[in-house]
Amino acid sequence: MASALLPASLLLVVLLLIPELFGDFMAYQIGLYLIYGIAAQGIGFLWGKTGVLPLGQALFFGIAAYVTAITLRAEGNLFLNLALAAIVLAVIAGSAFVLAALVFRGRNESGPYFSLITLALVMIAEQVAGTATSLTGGFNGMSGFNSLGNLDPFGGFYYVIVAATVAVSLLLFILNRLPVNLIAKAVLDNEPRMQLLGFPTHMIKGAAFAFSAMIAALAGGLFASHQGIVTPASTGFALSAELVILTAVGGRFHVLGPLIGAVIVGWASTELRDSFPYWELLMAVVFILVVLKAPGGIAELFEAAFRRVRPKTPTSAAPAVTAPETRFDKTPRPLRFEDVRLKIGVVRILNAVSFETPATGIISVIGPNGAGKTSALNTITGNLSVTGGRIMLGEVRIDSRPPHTALSNGIGSKLQVPSVFFSLSVSENLVIAMMAGRLRMSDLFKPSTFQWRSKSLSDILGHPSVPLKEEMTAPVEYLPQGHRQFLEYAMTVAAEPSILLLDEPCAGLSPDETALMTKLVQSYQSETSRLVIVIEHDMSIVEAISDKVLVLHLGKVLAFDDYDKVRQNPQVQAVYSGGTK
Amino acid sequence: MSSVLLLNLAWQISTLALVALGLAIVFGKLRIMNMAHGEFVMIGAYAPVITSMLGLPGWLQLPVCLVTVGPVAFVLERTIIRHLYGRMFDSLLATWGIAILLREIVELIFGRGYQSVSPPIAGTVCVFGADYPAYRIAVIIGILLGFIGLYWWNTRSKTGTRIKAMVGNPNLAEAIGINTARLSAGAFVFGCCTAGLAGLILAPTVRIEPMMGLDYLIRSFFALVVGGLGSLEGLGIGSGIIAGTQTFLGAVASQTYGYLAVLTLSTLFLWLKPNGVRSSSR
């Protein structure tokens, strides 16, 4: 944690020096910029990590500001006020979580629509604040209250702001080093994969939104107390947009970026606004340039300069810790399709597919292109909802559930095109895979979670021919196709699923790599005696590994038997050798 | 329902449809979340101001409008927007910057104060027993005819398909002979010019000022969200619902309630039916 304490204490020292060096009035102004900066830090966390862009953050800022104003007017008791502040923060975080989780439920992308909803909400709030005169004082706003604890806004209250700034920054620095940070980044990188690894991504994004809302509310409370007046503009569209601009210009990927942005832009605007008529113009141009050319903002420029002086030292890998057991039912159960139908638009993809697999073994699924093989696998994971029939795992119905619940039924899936976290390194990919099915809430905040290893994963990585161990720190986007296949396989197996779905695991592999992949699949099945369902086009592989072969054709089961019987089947021969149906 | 209210509904719906048309092209087809759309409406609305400042005859208002809006849109597309195809969040942010830029430039030239111009057609006509400004009647009929023409053209033209191909896969679109640079610039400039035209038409009926664009932007976005992107029918339905709700509630209750109802309706649509009433992509 020393790496979090050092920048936070530096920040503290710099902020404490400001009143000494520049006087109380400057400190008063810097205090206001810091308040905006705190709210922007919350935006930076949400937007920089999870990719969700909030356009209405002033909603929480403003609500908290109004509540603070109303409270400070009515009640002077510091202890009561602080208790009420805690309750308000909790309520705001709770409502933000519910809102975001509801909006994001059933989707696997963030899209611009959530941003537009936040925009619409903040406009509603501004309108209500301007018209509900009895509660908010209307367009003139609320004033005539003392600041929290009766501190002087031009004196003592500055130190309250400094304390809040440093506390929020320290918290964000610490979060940066914990598994939550990696999970947030993974959600941004590849949300469908996170869902298949069992993470409820809508809740993760909801939690991130709630956290940023809470920070905005904290800033709003400070604002009311600092300024002594709250107007509808405090919960308005313009302030929301301003906060986003501060975040972008300062740098959304860095904890201190939004703070730097807020202070620099705020200070420059008061200095220049009167003497330089093109100031707003300049700001707009800078903002456009940042969006186009420097998405990392000012903070990234600072960091690049700093790294030139002190290059990043590679951290040595921490020793592995045995991961806890995965927490789902591992008893072998047969998978049963009962009259499953799937229709997308006017296309009927599966037409009354029925079969029952044994509880363990390797099942190969073959069939010509368009037979419905991949779609059948996607109905098992819940990525596609069936339009008729049902899918049973033992006595549990598993079809048409959200994809993130598949792993809790023991289903792990490797997709046709390798779906991994492309912007993360190989080892980060594996860390996330190790959390799948194992993570408890408390593990999110323990650094030791990064060191988790399980036997199934060590077996694969320890295999002399598997290429991954030399490239642990390399970003996955630079890996060749074959290595991505092995990575995704390792990530899927890391959770030790009771049903392993593999969609063409050997696609794009060399003959040597194909042999290796086949061997890995076979040894996983024989050691764990789980059920493996694999889609494969290469008949020599199908022959070598299959206990049973399922032949799909035009969305129907053509045959389901052992390899030799399937090969003798005249209907299968007709489909494969181009005869008449 | 009084006939004035009916005529007001027709006026609000038709002008909103015209304002939203440009955004339907730029957002619906090019997938650029153009937050500067309202600013093009604003620049268009300044065209009569420019015309009278320069002492030019009134019939030059339309050419002046196109000559101010078109080149601005073209330059912005070639310098900024073209980097943003396929980057929706970035397009939102960069065009937000553009919106501030345009507002500030206009403010530097014309000042912050309100301007007003008189309509080219004065007087009122009696429709359904109510006296209504002749200019508004002419505009409603003109927009209606314009949309009928556009609909007729749209069912025959392949331009929409080409734009869709370009946005979906620019490299492949170029490979099959689509000049993507010309097509994207053309579509963006056309979208912005319709916004400018809307501004020109609205100019005699509103207060012209640098900040006027925001309201049009928001209502256009909501009209598209409610109606559904990508079809003219959706645009009409969305404009009808948004402008209809606002005008009706504004008349029977108050402007605030009308505005709140529109915002609430849009939020519900964004949440529960993000593809709108009509989501077919034409």
Image (cartoon, rainbow, N blue to C red):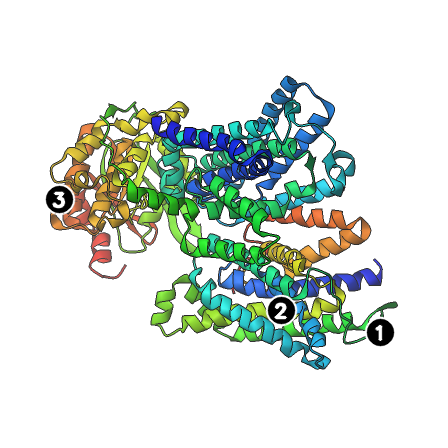
The image shows residue A81 at horizontal and vertical percentages of 65, 22
Relative vertical location of residue B145 with respect to residue A457 in this rendering, above or below: below
Say whether disc 2 or disc 1 marks the residue closer to the N-terminus: 1
Q: Chain of mark 1?
A: B
Amino acid under disc 1: Gly
Residue A31, image quadrant:
top right
Residue A254, image quadrant:
top left
Q: Is residue A428 left or right of residue B38?
A: left
Q: As drawn, which residue projects farthest toward the right?
A: B129
Q: Is residue B221 left or right of residue A204?
A: right
Amino acid under disc 3: Ala
As drawn, the label of residue A515 is 3
Residue A527, image quadrant:
top left
* Mark 1: few/some/many CA within 10 Å (<14, 14-19, 20+): few
Quadrant position of the C terminus of chain A in the picture: bottom left
**Helix, strand or loop at mark 2:** helix
**Residue assigned mark 1:** B123
